[in-house]
């Protein structure tokens, strides 16, 4: 996949970059992982899976998640899909053997977008699409 | 499951795998942590940039995820409702969400209001099933006095049979379906000697075998260690609940004191004598 990371081989336009950023951040579980890691730097897969499952069952995601939340399913999806995708984008490093996740260096515009998304996902802010796009273009 | 040989033994056998409770939110909820700190759990808080109203906690046991509780339930922990078992406020209480999650974890210090709230949950299970046998140890029968209307209604509106245990410091009115057991060695069945009478005074317990539904079996066993201070645990392990109620039947009889030819027989689950 094309990536937001420093190892990309083809030149990317601003639009490509923005598309990739939004692709990576399009799943709420990937965003929750970032919210958690921005507070704690590192986490085990189990800790992230519990945090994300609880978030959907009883936390900020409870209002919008419709299906019953299954911890094992959340954990497997983190392991096989979400964490590799976040790692490909350079947002985290994922030590698969130790199941240990560490926050990467987020560029300022990424920080801005993640912060804005956090405000919306937690119900503390309304979605301001114009501000969102403008901040990621700066 | 080998036979339980005392109330203390029953409590001793309530041992779940190590439990980890993690709270998530902008900051620690101190009253919630004070409550959870009374249990033998690994307790942690992890900061998340979410509103206090969206805070939550997760419970893991022996590596398995057990469940979560929302912030809206946290307030009920400090002051759980305890009016009557069938009261909608009790059923809707956030406190009941902690029951299954903390089962098997020892508590080192709980007061009467919390034990009463936990007892209410067990009584409500019995009320909902509507058959089988409910065992309630009040330490002294005078403590049963305030609960009498509830137990009268329990047996009046269901096919439940109830056994009440306690030292005879008050003489309750006879209620059809409720058997009283005082641990009085003169009149109890064989086996009720010495320590057994003492244990009735020392332990608060409520047990329900499930009335034929193992999934509804549950028991609370708590030993008084201070004026308003108990240590103990509760369990949903049906085999353990059965072993405990079999001990109570065998030691204190299945019928009103002195009336039961079956008193002293071990092995009955208590669920078959209705």
Image (cartoon, coloured by chain):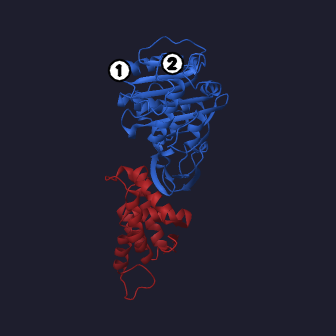
Chain colours: A red, B blue
Q: Quadrant of the C terminus of chain B?
A: top left
Q: Nearer the viewer, residue B138 or A128?
A: B138
Q: Secondary structure at mark 1?
A: helix
Which corner quadrant of the image does residue B127 belong to? top left
Position of residue B27 in the picture relative to residue A114 (left or right): right
* Tags 2 and 1 on a common chain: yes
Binning the other alpha carbons within 10 Å of mark 1 as few (below 14), some (14 to 19) or many (20 upward) gives: few
User: What residue is pinned by disc 1?
Assistant: B157
Q: Nearer the viewer, residue A80 or B164?
A: B164
Which corner quadrant of the image does residue A134 belong to? bottom left
Mark 2 or 1, which is nearer the eye? Answer: 2
Mark 2 → mark 1, Cα distance in angstroms? 19 Å
Q: Secondary structure at mark 2?
A: strand
Residue B180's disc number: 2
Q: Position of residue B67 (x, y in %)?
A: 44, 50
Q: Position of residue B145 (x, y in %)?
A: 53, 16
Q: In which chain is the residue bearing label 1? A: B
- Which residue lies most toward the left here? A66
Q: Position of residue B14 (x, y in %)?
A: 54, 42
Give the vertical position of A107 relative to B93 (above or below). Answer: below
Q: Nearer the viewer, residue A47 or A103?
A: A47
- Residue shown at 48%/16% (left/top)? B259
Position of residue B89 in the picture relative to residue B13 (left or right): left
Binning the other alpha carbons within 10 Å of mark 2 as few (below 14), some (14 to 19) or many (20 upward) gives: many
- Residue shown at 39%/89% (left/top)? A9
Res A125 visible: no
Give the vertical position of B36 relative to A22 (above or below). Answer: above
> Looking at the image, is mark 2 or mark 1 earlier in the sequence?
1
């Amino acid at each position: 996949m094309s990536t937001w990371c420093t190892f990309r081989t083809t030149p990317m336009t601003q639009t490509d970059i923005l598309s990739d950023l939004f692709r990576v951040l399009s799943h709420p579980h990937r965003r929750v992982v970032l919210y958690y890691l921005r507070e704690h730097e590192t986490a085990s897969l189990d800790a992230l899976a519990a945090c994300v499952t609880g978030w959907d069952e009883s936390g900020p995601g409870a209002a919008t998640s419709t299906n019953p939340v299954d911890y094992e399913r959340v954990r497997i999806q983190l392991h096989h899909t979400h964490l590799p995708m976040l790692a490909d984008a350079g947002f985290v490093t994922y030590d698969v053997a130790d199941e240990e996740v560490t926050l990467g260096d987020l560029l300022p515009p990424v920080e801005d977008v993640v912060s804005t998304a956090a405000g919306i996902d937690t119900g503390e802010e309304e979605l301001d699409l114009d501000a969102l796009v403008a901040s990621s273009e700066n | 499951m080998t036979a339980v040989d005392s109330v203390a033994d029953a409590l001793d056998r309530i041992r779940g795998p190590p439990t980890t409770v993690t709270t998530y939110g902008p900051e620690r909820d101190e009253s919630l942590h004070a409550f959870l700190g009374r249990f033998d759990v690994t307790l942690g808080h992890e900061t998340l940039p979410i509103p206090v109203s969206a805070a939550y906690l997760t419970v893991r046991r022996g590596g398995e995820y057990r469940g979560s509780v929302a912030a809206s339930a946290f307030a009920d922990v400090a002051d759980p409702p305890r009016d009557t078992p069938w009261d909608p406020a009790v059923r809707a209480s956030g406190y009941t969400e902690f029951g299954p999650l903390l089962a098997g974890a020892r508590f080192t210090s709980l007061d009467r209001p919390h034990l009463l709230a936990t007892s209410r949950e067990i009584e409500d299970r019995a009320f909902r099933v509507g058959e089988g046998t409910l065992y309630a140890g009040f330490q002294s029968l005078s403590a049963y006095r305030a609960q009498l209307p509830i137990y009268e209604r329990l047996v009046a509106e269901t096919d439940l049979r109830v056994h009440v245990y306690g030292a005879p410091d008050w003489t309750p009115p006879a209620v059809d379906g409720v058997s009283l057991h005082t641990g009085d060695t003169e009149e109890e069945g064989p086996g009720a000697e010495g320590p057994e009478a003492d244990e009735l005074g020392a332990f608060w317990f409520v047990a329900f075998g499930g009335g034929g539904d193992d999934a509804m079996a549950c028991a609370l066993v708590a030993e008084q260690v201070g004026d308003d201070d108990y240590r103990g645990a509760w369990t949903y392990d049906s085999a353990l609940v059965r072993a405990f109620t079999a001990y109570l039947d065998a030691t204190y009889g299945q019928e009103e004191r002195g009336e039961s030819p079956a008193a002293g027989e071990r092995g009955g689950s208590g669920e078959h004598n209705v």
